[in-house]
């Protein structure tokens, strides 16, 4: 059975670095709407430090969804024409360093709940719904997905306080079982690049 790799995506998480600053959430709006770019701020959002003492390229709010990025990261994304994001102004009380509130506006369709029984690991969505952005989030989630291009850019420039799931690469591909099931385009986790379609079926992933 043929197997074709189309795209490779990665998940972005907090790096949870030592003494990282955690910002107190100051949003009057729904913070999921803020994350999704549905809310715009023309005046700087005033943020205060709740925990920690050390600045990194990425700092997170205490609600666990939203975050801010440094001037270094902001310029890196612009210079390399990274897509799927926008920012809003932020002032962090007690610091002169420039930070920007970060919003992910790249999208794919909603995640597809697997119909098969048994073990399942990973995510599925219709790849036709992905808008092609480097940063994107499936509808109705606050997951942070990125392209391989973006992963290499962040790692190559030593961006701090992020964790990119390098062990689990999401591969979009089409795989059809002998019973004609699961012929949809799907996003799955492959631990080894050599894992073939038969092996995936034995794990009930495909």
Image (spheres, helix red, strand yellow):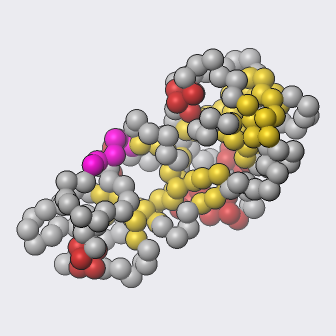
Task: Name the outermost residue toward the bottom.
Answer: 194
- Whether residue 122 can be seen here: yes
Q: Is residue 59 magenta?
A: no
Q: State whether residue 71 is above or below residue 156.
A: above
Q: How many marks?
A: 0
Frontmost residue, 142 versus 120: 120
The residue lying at 39 percent from left, 82 percent from top is 194
Task: Name the outermost residue toward the left.
Answer: 179
Work out which quarter of the rendered image holds the C terminus and state it: bottom left
The residue lying at 40 percent from left, 65 percent from top is 189
Q: Quadrant of residue 190?
A: bottom left
Give the overall secondary structure of the magenta segment.
loop
Residue 69 coordinates in the image, percent (x, y): 72, 42
Q: Quadrant of residue 160?
A: bottom right
Q: State whether residue 138 is above or below residue 166.
A: above
Frontmost residue, 146 versus 114: 114
Residue 45 coordinates in the image, percent (x, y): 74, 23
Work out which quarter of the rendered image holds the N terminus and state it: bottom left
- Left or right: where does residue 21 sit relative to residue 165? right
The residue lying at 31 percent from left, 71 percent from top is 4
Frontmost residue, 140 versus 146: 140
In magenta, the rendered stretch is 108-113
The residue lying at 56 percent from left, 67 percent from top is 166
- Left or right: where does residue 204 sit relative to residue 122? left
- Left or right: where does residue 38 sit relative to residue 72? left
- Whether residue 172 can be seen here: no
Q: Is residue 110 magenta?
A: yes
């Amino acid at each position: 059975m043929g197997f074709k790799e189309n795209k490779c995506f990665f998940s972005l998480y907090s790096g949870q670095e030592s003494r990282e600053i955690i910002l107190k959430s100051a949003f009057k709006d729904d913070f999921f709407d803020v994350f999704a770019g549905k809310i715009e701020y023309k005046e700087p959002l005033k943020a205060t430090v709740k925990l920690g003492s050390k600045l990194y390229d990425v700092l997170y709010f205490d609600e666990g969804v939203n975050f801010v990025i440094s001037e270094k990261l902001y310029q890196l994304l612009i210079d390399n024409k990274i897509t799927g994001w926008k920012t809003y102004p932020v002032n962090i009380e007690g610091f002169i360093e420039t930070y920007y509130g970060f919003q992910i506006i790249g999208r794919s369709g909603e995640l597809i709940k697997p119909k098969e029984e048994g073990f399942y690991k990973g995510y599925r969505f219709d790849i036709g719904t992905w808008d092609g952005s480097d940063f994107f989030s499936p509808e109705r989630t606050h997951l942070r997905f990125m392209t391989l291009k973006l992963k290499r850019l962040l790692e190559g420039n030593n961006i701090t306080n992020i964790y990119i799931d390098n062990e689990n690469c999401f591969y979009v591909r089409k795989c059809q079982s002998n019973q004609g099931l699961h012929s949809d385009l799907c996003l799955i986790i492959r631990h080894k690049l050599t894992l073939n379609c038969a092996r995936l079926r034995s794990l009930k992933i495909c």
